[in-house]
Amino acid sequence: MDQKLIALIVGYIADLLLGDPRWLPHPIRLFGTVIDKGERWLNKGDYRFVKGMLFTLILCGAVAVFFVVLMLYVPWTGGLFVFYGLANSSLLQEGREVFRELDTNGLEAGRKRLSWIVGRDTSRLDGNQIRTAVFETLSENLSDGVIAPLFYYAIGGVPAMMTYKMINTLDSMIGYKKERYRLFGRFAARLDDVANYIPARLTALLMVLVTGSKRGLVYIFRYGHQHASPNSGYPEAALAGILHCRFGGPNTYDGVVVEKPYIGDHPRFIFEKELIKVMYINHAVTFLMVTAIILLRLFIKF
């Protein structure tokens, strides 16, 4: 078995067993620190769009070159960076924690814990809205945090995977539709949209495949394009169809109510036990993607 497959398997198993320990140094935190310092330095004065575009391209190029060289000279570190590139176990752990806080310590605790993983205002959400928000986040981040990194790993190994992680981190930090980042972060946001175009749709189809949900497939085509994001709506629509529920609708960001279309046509109560099904979907989709990459690598030799 070649080095690329060994790294994939090692990284996948490590993510399953360890998740994302907070004490462990993580390259994404380094990415975040560099982005923060660079944004504070450059995002002022004239030519903000140009500066933001160049900043984004330089960071992505630097990451790509660094990891090409690293994999050339220290290939045995590949498994470590696959582990760093995947976020499924930590994502599911965060979802479980929100449900646990809500069930154990009540509404305020659930709202506070949810605020750790979503950008919306959680202060007025009721219990059902909190559970719904968790499921929306888990489906969206199954694409961004798991399938997209694996997709780029399949294409270009660790360098492509970590370059994608830089793109996604840039989008999460400066790609928001806030006035401060409107010009400086526009290129990063559009680059992230392009990078996630195929993975988001692939994620949705894999979700339907592992559940055999015909309704999920229908929802992908009926509602996937209605989300404000060109990509997030597809995995959310798949999960809404699988669970026969409704996502989306108005949300508050920084005190401003943002009208968003609904995804699905069946508003209903979300039960705690449904988290188990959503966790199964995430794990099954991840396993299927990893298996597909292994098989393609073994039999097509890409």
Image: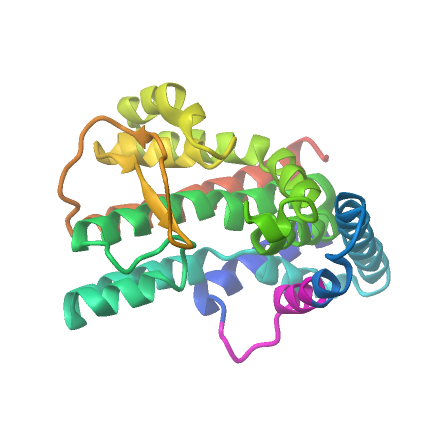
- On the question of residue 189 being in view, the answer is yes
- 268 in relation to 112, above or below: above
Nearest the viewer among 11 and 262 is 262
Q: Is residue 49 left or right of residue 107?
A: right
- Residue located at (18% from left, 54% from top): 126
- Residue located at (27% from left, 28% from top): 264
Residue 173 position, x and y percent, is 59, 56
Residue 155 position, x and y percent, is 70, 39
Nearest the viewer among 99 and 88 is 99
Residue 24 forms part of the magenta stretch: yes
Residue 237 forms part of the magenta stretch: no
Question: Hey, which quadrant is residue 237 in on the image?
Answer: top left
Residue 169 position, x and y percent, is 61, 55
Q: Magenta part of the protein: which range?
A: 21-36
According to the image, what is the colour scheme of the structure? rainbow
- Residue located at (72% from left, 35% from top): 301
Q: Give the total of numbered labels.
A: 0
Nearest the viewer among 290 and 36 is 36
Q: Is residue 146 left or right of residue 121?
A: right
Magenta region, mostly helix, strand or loop?
helix
Residue 97 position, x and y percent, is 30, 66
Identify the residue at the far bottom of this view: 23
